[in-house]
Image (cartoon, rainbow, N blue to C red):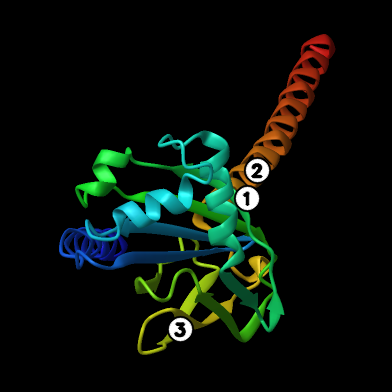
Amino acid sequence: MKRLLLCLLCACALHLTVSAHVLDQYLQVTQIALAPNNVRVELRLVPGMQVADRICALIDADGDGRITTPEEQAYARRVLQDIELAVSGVNVSLSLTDMQFPTQPEMRDGLGTIRFTYEASATLSAADHQQLYFRNNHLPELGVYLVNALMPTTTEIKVGKQERDPLQRGLRLDYQVTPTSTTLSWRGIAMLLFCLFLLLWRHLRHFLRTQFILKKFSSNQQHRRI
């Protein structure tokens, strides 16, 4: 329940921030999600009305007035080149997994949001104190920035202190990973008890059947003697 409330509050804050961004700036909102085997970086880029033409021209590389899929992919790669990500002091390579572009009229009206999702295959090793470092260097002359870490969806990862620079272009995130072997879930316990029950029931049935056969054999022997 607490996680649901936190997610709702983050969503409301993000919606209010996007709705109220300055017209002559390029709002860039980053959300980072940690998982045992990967790190996901979600970017929401919202150009203000007064800079929308400049952003459209930057994406429309051939200047024909149309933004094609290859041009969208090229811009996604350019944004990726401006992102720094390190896990436990080691630089990590991100790859694009999803992108969504608004129409040019939506961007020029200040209502269009460009969405990029990047992922890195990084195994978060078990340790008491580790740190993730992120920095967004995309168009600093236009950009205003927000960066946050999402609540992990697994109990194996606990998020600690978050330190941001004054412009929120960068984030240092402390986290802790608990080994899977020490975190036996209720589902695992239930499965273990069920398997134990089946094993005991099998032995019990065998024992009862053996007792029944012996009792029947003994009864037959008594009848024959009579």
Helix, strand or loop under label 2: helix
Q: In which quarter of the image is residue 169?
A: bottom left
Mark drawn on residue 192:
1
Q: Is residue 212 above or below residue 70?
A: above
Helix, strand or loop under label 3: strand
Q: Measure the C-alpha gap from mark 2 to mark 3.
A: 38 Å
Q: Nearer the viewer, residue 53 or 9?
A: 53
Mark drawn on residue 160:
3
Quadrant where the image shows the C terminus: top right
- Specify the amino acid type for callout 3: Gly
Q: Nearer the viewer, residue 220 or 184?
A: 184
Q: Earlier in the sequence, mark 2 or mark 3?
A: 3
Q: In this view, does 222 lie above or below 102?
A: above
- Specify the amino acid type for callout 2: Cys
Quadrant where the image shows the N terminus: bottom left
Q: In the rendering, at what x and y percent does residue 111 appear?
A: 22, 48
